[in-house]
Amino acid sequence: MFSIVGNAQDNPTIILGNGFSIMPKMIYISSATVQLFPFSKDQFERSFTEELSGGYGYGISFRKKLLREDLSFGLSTEYIKIVDSELTQTFDNDTVRYRARVTEELSMIPIELTGYFNIPNFSEDLKIYLGGGVGVYFGDRKRTVIDIQSKTISKQAGFSFVILSGLEYKFTKAFSGVFEIRFRQAEYSVKSEYPVSNIKINGTSFPLDKNLNSKIFVDGLKLSLGIAYNF
């Protein structure tokens, strides 16, 4: 380990050769939003969205203290899945109207680069930190109407800024528990289509728009809980 220690009353300890941590974590996302017609020429259609319930995931983070004891940078990735089967879609003609069951399934893998700053003069075992950074977001969307599921044609990653805060409690010198809150837009785009152009409900056939060009925002509150190994 190589370290340079300054005056403790004036400057934080400068650390170059240690201060690594690796943390597996469990994740909860409170909600997501699907923009149904993001590329429509009609401004009113572009405002159509579908709100989805939350989901769960898991991930891993790597962090390194840099130059100062209270400053670090990290790289993290996750796998998040949201399944909402409480949605409906209306089909009607001149004589009948039906509400069909719809299931939306989202999956996302973000890669985020973030900086962390520990609030000074806090407890020795409990640290509060703030941070921010940027991320790139890869994902997919599957929409199922009754038993007809969409097929993905293409996907495009998106970028977003990240704001975060958290608590870290040190159990031992090597292990600590971390609770974190992140705010982000987490946007990506998916082009997909149904395998058929009509759907039959109770013997009645209705047209089904084949093309599904959507933007997804996994923009709900993200909560994570993990155990960090510090070395």
Image: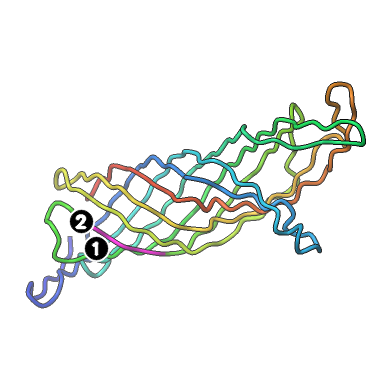
Disc 2/disc 1 C-alpha distance (Å): 7 Å
Query: What is the quadrant of residue 6 in the picture?
Result: bottom left
Foreground: 178 or 174?
178
The residue shown at (17%, 47%) is 170
Q: Amino acid at mark 2?
A: Lys
Answer whether residue 60 is magenta in the image. no
Q: Position of residue 21 (x, y in %)?
A: 28, 51
The disc placed on residue 118 is: 1
| x then y, percent, for residue 124 | 11, 56
- Residue 50 or 174: which is nearer the viewer? 50
Q: How many marks?
A: 2
Q: Based on the picture, tell me whether residue 128 belongs to the magenta stretch.
A: yes
Residue at image x 37%, y 50%? Answer: 61
Which stretch did the figure color magenta?
127-132
Circle 2 residue? 127
Q: From the top left corner, tell me how far across and down residue 148 is, in percent.
A: 77, 30
Q: Are marks 2 and 1 in contact (CB under 8 Å)?
A: yes
Q: Which residue occupies 64% across, 38% down?
A: 104
